[in-house]
């Protein structure tokens, strides 16, 4: 409660008085007002992208993510990085995901490669080991709470193409929100 009050005060101080986004867009994506509000074709693209992002963020937060807590622009964009210009979220390290194929437990190696790559992607995205979700040695067992949450998260992944064309939707992975941690930043 006190922490969120302090956070709100800080946000109010740094956002211009006429910012209807209350600092969420500028601090969340590391963009200036002009990045989206200039009368240039690029800024108009940014404005349209941001409008879709706003709809997506609200829909996810009120929809499938509701039991777990909302997401914000900051969740994926993390303030845009030091350059203050970069709005593309950090991407999943695909070579780390591939490299993990060699670390698979012997009793699960017969699993088809696409499933193994998906599992590695989950582990890298959340920064966890297989045991976070599974009972080692009993890979089919569905007893740990993160297994159930993961099934909900898989439905979240299906939402992104509704807001983007196919090429852009592929930029979304578990890592886009989690970025190597179980808890997400907001
Ligand atoms: C990442 C892009 C982005 C940034 C950065 C941004 N805005 Fe916006 N702004 C939008 C979008 C999209 C809308 C449309 C309504 C909405 O989704 O809130 C909007 C709406 C507005 C409106 C209402 C009028 C309109 O054009 O629809 C004002 C005023 C405004 N912004 C001012 C600001 C100010 C001041 C800043 C800087 C502190 C800022 N914006 C930063 C994208 C942005
Ligand atoms: C679930 C993760 C996620 C959330 C939440 C999110 N974004 Fe994005 N955003 C992305 C991804 C991924 C891309 C890059 C898509 C691509 O590669 O074209 C992107 C791209 C953008 C772009 C275009 C960047 C460029 O240079 O082309 C803007 C502007 C943007 N987001 C603004 C916002 C704003 C404003 C919010 C909050 C209302 C927001 N985003 C919330 C994931 C997210
Ligand atoms: C974030 C949770 C999570 C992590 C981490 C994870 N898994 Fe999974 N795993 C699942 C879920 C959920 C399924 C069920 C299939 C699905 O819904 O995608 C599954 C399915 C499997 C299966 C197939 C079981 C069957 O039905 O035949 C195997 C084998 C497996 N995982 C092994 C692993 C290994 C090995 C790791 C570590 C490299 C791992 N998993 C990491 C959640 C996870
Ligand atoms: C749109 C953003 C978003 C995406 C994409 C996403 N998650 Fe999540 N995830 C969340 C939020 C928000 C929470 C709640 C975390 C918190 O309490 O901070 C969460 C929580 C979880 C948890 C529960 C962690 C715990 O506390 O036990 C698991 C497991 C999980 N996610 C797995 C995944 C997997 C696997 C994927 C990809 C299939 C994924 N997530 C994709 C936003 C996301």
Image (cartoon, rainbow, N blue to C red):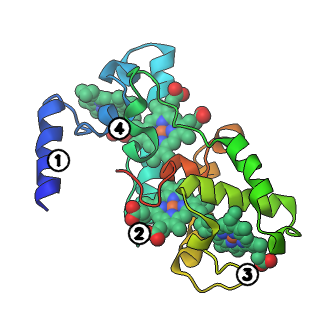
Q: Earlier in the sequence, mark 2 or mark 1?
A: 1
Q: Residues within 10 Å of mark 1 (few under 14, many from 20)?
A: few
Q: Under tag 3, what secondary structure?
A: loop
Q: Which circle, 2 or 3, is nearer the viewer? A: 3
Label pair 2/4, CB-CB below 8 angstroms: no
Q: Earlier in the sequence, mark 3 or mark 1?
A: 1
For disc 1, the marked residue is 7
Q: CA distance from mark 3 to mark 1?
A: 45 Å
Q: Which circle, 3 or 1, is nearer the viewer? A: 3
- In the image, is the residue at mark 2 within 8 Å of ligand 4 by its beta carbon? yes
Kindly identify the residue that appears in the image at 42 percent across and 55 percent down: 184
Q: Under tag 4, what secondary structure?
A: helix
Q: CA distance from mark 4 to mark 3?
A: 42 Å
Label pair 3/1, CB-CB below 8 angstroms: no
Label pair 4/3, CB-CB below 8 angstroms: no
Q: CA distance from mark 2 to mark 3?
A: 29 Å
Q: Earlier in the sequence, mark 2 or mark 3?
A: 2
Residue 155 visible here: no
For disc 3, the marked residue is 137
């Amino acid at each position: 409660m006190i922490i969120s009050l302090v956070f709100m005060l800080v946000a109010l101080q740094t956002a211009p008085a006429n910012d209807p986004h209350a600092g969420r867009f500028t601090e969340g994506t590391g963009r200036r007002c002009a990045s989206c509000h200039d009368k240039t074709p690029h800024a108009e693209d940014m404005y349209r992208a941001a409008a879709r992002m706003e709809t997506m963020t609200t829909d996810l937060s009120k929809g499938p993510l509701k039991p777990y807590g909302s997401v914000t622009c900051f969740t994926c964009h993390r303030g845009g990085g030091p350059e203050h210009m970069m709005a593309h979220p950090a991407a999943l390290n695909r070579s780390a995901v591939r490299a993990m194929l060699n670390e698979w437990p012997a009793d699960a190696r017969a699993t088809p490669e696409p499933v193994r790559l998906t599992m590695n992607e989950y582990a890298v995205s959340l920064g966890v080991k297989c045991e976070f979700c599974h009972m080692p040695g009993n890979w089919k067992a569905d007893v740990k709470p993160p297994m159930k949450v993961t099934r909900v998260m898989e439905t979240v992944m299906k939402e992104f193409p509704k807001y983007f064309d196919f090429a852009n939707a592929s930029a979304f992975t578990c890592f886009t929100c989690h970025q190597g941690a179980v808890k997400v930043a907001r």
